[in-house]
Image (tube, rainbow, N blue to C red):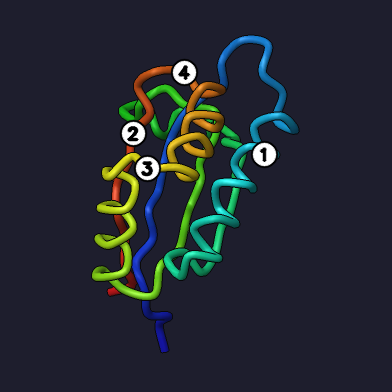
Amino acid sequence: MPETGVALNALFSLRKGTTEEAFLSACDAFYRHLRDAGYARGFRFLRRLPLPGFGLRLPDFDYQIIIEFADAETEAACYDYLQANQEPVRSLHAAMNSKVVEGAQFYLTTCA
């Protein structure tokens, strides 16, 4: 039986000089805030392991984040919350994004 929910996926690279630990610290604070606010219910941080000859059409990225939500409505409400750009999420989001190279790619997934 497939899991239910929606996942926000982000493909990105870190800015030169930014460590995984520094990014994860900022990302964890951002995620915990979304979780405590009732939006997010899970989080994964993945490092890309390129496969020779495969994935040639994918964008250039080194990392992937997956933030899980109970459903599409909760993800949409979270998006609206971020777009309102109010504190404290504004500072948490900026602290995380300041460590990422411009051009991150985002997409949503759900179990079929």
Element carrying mark 1: helix
Local packing at callout 4 (Cα closer than 10 Å; few below 14, some 14-19, many 20+) is few
Judging depth in this view, the residue of 33 and 10 nearest the camera is 33
Dot 2 amino acid type: Gln
State the residue at coordinates (37%, 53%).
8
Q: How far apart are marks 1 and 3 (CA)?
A: 22 Å
Question: Nearer the observer, disc 1 or disc 2?
Answer: 1
Label 4 belongs to which residue?
A: 101
Residue 69 x %, y % = 40, 67
Q: Earlier in the sequence, mark 1 or mark 4?
A: 1
Label 1, label 4: how far apart the Cα atoms are: 15 Å
* Residue type marked 1: Leu
- Say which label, 1 or 3, has the lower sequence index: 1
Q: Earlier in the sequence, mark 3 or mark 2?
A: 3
Q: CA separation, marks 3 and 2?
A: 23 Å
| Amino acid on which the number 3 mark rests in the picture | Gln
Query: Are the residues tagged 3 and 2 within 8 Å (C-beta)?
Result: no
Residue assigned mark 2: 105
> Residue 14 appears in which quarter of the rendering?
top right
In the rendered image, which residue does mark 3 sit on? 86
Question: Dot 1 corresponds to which residue?
Answer: 24
